[in-house]
Image (spheres, rainbow, N blue to C red):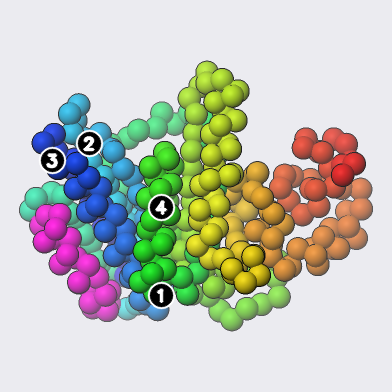
Amino acid sequence: MVQYALNVSIPILPKETPGAANNTYWELVNRWHTLAPAVNDLGGSGYYYLVTNFPLSEKITSHVFVGYLLFFGQKDTKKVEKLFKPFTEWLYKTVGTPESGLVSQLISPAAPATNYFKTLAPTLSGQGGNGILGSRLLSRELLSTPSGVQRSTEALRQIDWLGGFILGHYVAPGPKPVDDATHSAWRKAITHIVIANNWEAGDSLEKQAAVKSLMSNTMVPRLKSLDFDSKTGKQTMGSYVNEADKEELNWQDSFWGEKYGKLKKIKTKYDPNGVFWCRPCVGSEDWDLVGICRSTR
């Protein structure tokens, strides 16, 4: 196994031309997703974080990109080095060399890479928070064309501007399809994008409802529209139920796709009284929002 780690910081300087750091940052994201098919071909998988407006000091903020715990099914580093070389050269020319402290990259045999994540100052108290998630699987087909990559970048940039936190997961290629409950979109997925939004303790119920509505009605639909069949009017990918918006529209299709009908029959056969329940899970549409009474819809 070969591991890859990347930490890029693009400062927003006090006298900088407005938008310069933003444009460089999203060009970085665009180039990163352009690499997705090649990463997939080398058996690569792992996390990457998009963190904008991260405070470096009282006066300076920075846009941060972190590639963390990426692993490749390779015996040596040469192919991974070759893959990232043009991308790295662009970073050194545009953002800064390793000596600048703005770009740090690691390609080595597998070993803990947690030191790269520690370069971000801690921002969480460890006590949890008030937030919601939304997610989408993006297809290899989408990120295999310049136009698809560009549309993805624009969607992520819009979501970030609205206040969403963005986490990506490169998905390693799996074996040929098998008969299981997993959404078939996973077999076409090349990355899994998770977005988050939150509210502060003490915020009004109206504010919380607005945050939830933004996620369900704006942020997630923008991701959903990236893999969409205009002829049928239906989504062509899906979402990961464990990291998703529980208010997801058409959630049966988003989480299980064409397999939902079969799963519902199995659920009805072995649990006819609906003892095992969660929201949104298979069969939860038969119950009210809290799972106490049968739905009358």
What residue is shown at x 19% (from left), y 55% (from top)? 104
Q: How far apart are marks 1 and 2 (CA)?
A: 33 Å
**Pointer 3 residue:** 16
Q: Distance between the residues labelled 4 and 3?
A: 23 Å
Say which amino acid is labelled 1: Ser
**Pointer 4 residue:** 156
Q: Can residue 182 be seen in this view?
A: no
In the rendered structure, which segment of residues is drawn in magenta?
Answer: 76-98
- Front-lying residue, 7 or 196: 196
Q: Earlier in the sequence, mark 1 or mark 2?
A: 2
Q: Do the residues labelled 1 and 4 touch (CB within 8 Å)?
A: no
Q: Are marks 4 and 2 in contact (CB under 8 Å)?
A: no
- Front-lying residue, 223 or 229: 229
Q: How crowded is mark 3: few (under 14 residues within 10 Å), some or many (20 or more)?
A: few
Q: How far apart are marks 1 and 3 (CA)?
A: 34 Å
Find numbered disc 4 in the image and state the secondary structure of the residue it sits on. Answer: helix
Q: Is residue 200 visible?
A: yes
Q: How crowded is mark 4: few (under 14 residues within 10 Å), some or many (20 or more)?
A: many
Q: How far apart are marks 1 and 4 (CA)?
A: 17 Å
Q: Earlier in the sequence, mark 1 or mark 4?
A: 1
Say which amino acid is labelled 2: Thr
Find numbered disc 3 in the image and state the secondary structure of the residue it sits on. Answer: loop
Say which amino acid is labelled 3: Glu
List x then y, in percent, for residue 249: 66, 50
**Pointer 2 residue:** 61
Camera-side mark, 1 or 3: 3
Find numbered disc 2 in the image and state the secondary structure of the residue it sits on. Answer: strand
Q: Do the residues labelled 4 and 3 touch (CB within 8 Å)?
A: no
Q: Earlier in the sequence, mark 1 or mark 3?
A: 3
Image quadrant occupied by the N terminus: bottom left
